[in-house]
Amino acid sequence: MPGPDILFVLTQGITRGWKAGVVFAAGLCTGLIAHVTAVSLGVSVLLMSSPTAFLALKFAGAAYLLYLAVKAFRARRENPFRLEEGKAFSGKLYRKGILMNLLNPKVILFFLAFFPQFVAPDAARPVLQMLLLGLIFMVQAFVIFSLVAVLAGRLARPLMSHPRIALWVHVVEAFIYAAIGVSILFV
């Protein structure tokens, strides 16, 4: 099953074109910088040890995704390929990617559970080792996300020119946001 990030990139590539998907992927990967740094410095352990802080993060992430679901559903009749383009539009998508990544508690859990397994216990500089692993992870994630965005954009363009198909794609986009938003509550 694809993870939430890949589904978001796929959705952006389908509904707004490959360039939007790549910009969104760049935002998601930029958000990873905060997670990698937090795990490397032990800050995430503090967050996880505070049930109140973790619960607040879960609710904020779920609320944001549900907000995006409502917004996507309300925009279901718009022609997605006629959206505003340029620096302002790209900046908005980029910031959306960062925010979605930062508010996703599953990412913190992933890095807490996954990264320490690959750090040598006797390493002289485990923080640097974790930062390097994080950088490698971010680069590979960006490459994969970008490939998915390009493929989705190329395949979806002919389909999205049909208003009825475009309508259903937007409904599915709203459903994906809502489903992932609700699933975050059960982390």
Image (tube, rainbow, N blue to C red):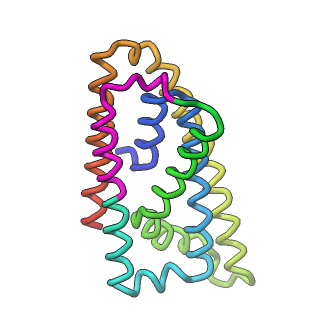
In-image side of 28 versus 166 (left or right)? right
Q: Relative to residue 72, is residue 150 depicted above or below?
A: above
| Residue 158 located within the stretch drawn in magenta | no
| Viewer-side residue, 173 vs 80 | 80
Picture quarter with the C terminus: bottom left
In-image side of 82 versus 38 (left or right)? left
Q: Main secondary structure of the magenta part?
A: helix
- Range of magenta residues: 64-83
Residue appearing at x 52%, y 20% in the figure? 154
Number of numbered discs present?
A: 0
Picture quarter with the N terminus: top left
Residue 63 horizontal/vertical position (percent): 31, 60
Residue 61 horizontal/vertical position (percent): 37, 62
In-image side of 136 versus 156 (left or right)? right
Residue appearing at x 68%, y 69% in the figure? 131
Farthest right residue?
124
| Viewer-side residue, 113 vs 77 | 77
In-image side of 9 versus 94 (left or right)? left
Residue appearing at x 44%, y 21% in the figure? 156
| Viewer-side residue, 67 vs 165 | 67
Q: Relative to residue 50, is residue 131 depicted above or below?
A: above
Residue 41 horizontal/vertical position (percent): 62, 81
| Residue 73 located within the stretch drawn in magenta | yes
Residue appearing at x 28%, y 37% in the figure? 73
Query: Looking at the rendering, which quadrant does residue 19 occupy?
Result: top right
Residue 51 horizontal/vertical position (percent): 33, 84
